[in-house]
Image (spheres, rainbow, N blue to C red):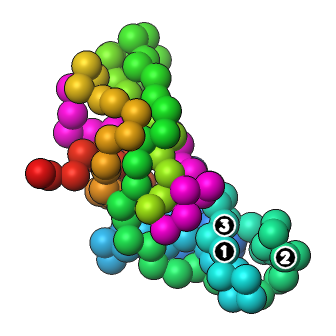
Amino acid sequence: MSADSGRVLPEVTAESQAFWTGGFDGELRITRCQDCRGWIHPPVGACWRCRSRDVEPEVASGRATVASFTVNHHQWLPAFPAPYVIAVVELDEQPDVRLTTYLTGVEVDEVTVGMSVEVVFEEHDDVALPFFRPVAA
């Protein structure tokens, strides 16, 4: 847990390091197969489509669409006042690649399935957490 935020931070591994640190450079880095060119998340050492082990992180656009969401009404940790939105977003590059994320910059009653969102990062210790906010009109 980060002392400054109360957030539980992920463990950074060799396979996930680019994903968790890309935000320090303003980049959403998603693993991509170099053979079939499919995007892969969460980051793993082989492509689930073609079984290639030639995978490496690449910069994605950071644009996505809300596929589903839930509104949490219980305050589990002091740093997370309720209500807040946890969403599953589909990357614009490849809709079957989804990330579970926190939505920021939007009221809970304004969130809709199909909403266009973009990545923003919250920096902590050795990770930059990718969150999403609505795309400005």
Q: Main secondary structure of the magenta part?
A: loop
Q: Residue at the top extreme?
A: 74
Crowd around label 1: few <14 · some 14–19 · many ≥20 (10 Å): some
Crowd around label 3: few <14 · some 14–19 · many ≥20 (10 Å): many
Q: Can you tell which mark lies on residue 38?
A: 1
Mark 3 → mark 2, Cα distance in angstroms: 11 Å
Q: x, y percentage for residue 90?
A: 50, 51
Residue extent of the magenta highlight: 93-107
Residue 81's place in the image compared with 61, above or below, is above
Crowd around label 2: few <14 · some 14–19 · many ≥20 (10 Å): few
Judged left or right of residue 21, residue 108 is left
Asked if the stretch drawn in magenta spans residue 124, the answer is: no
Q: Mark 3 points at which residue?
A: 40
Query: In the depicted view, which residue is nearer to us: 84 or 117?
Result: 117
Which element carries disc 1, helix, strand or loop? Answer: loop
Q: Are marks 1 and 3 in contact (CB under 8 Å)?
A: yes
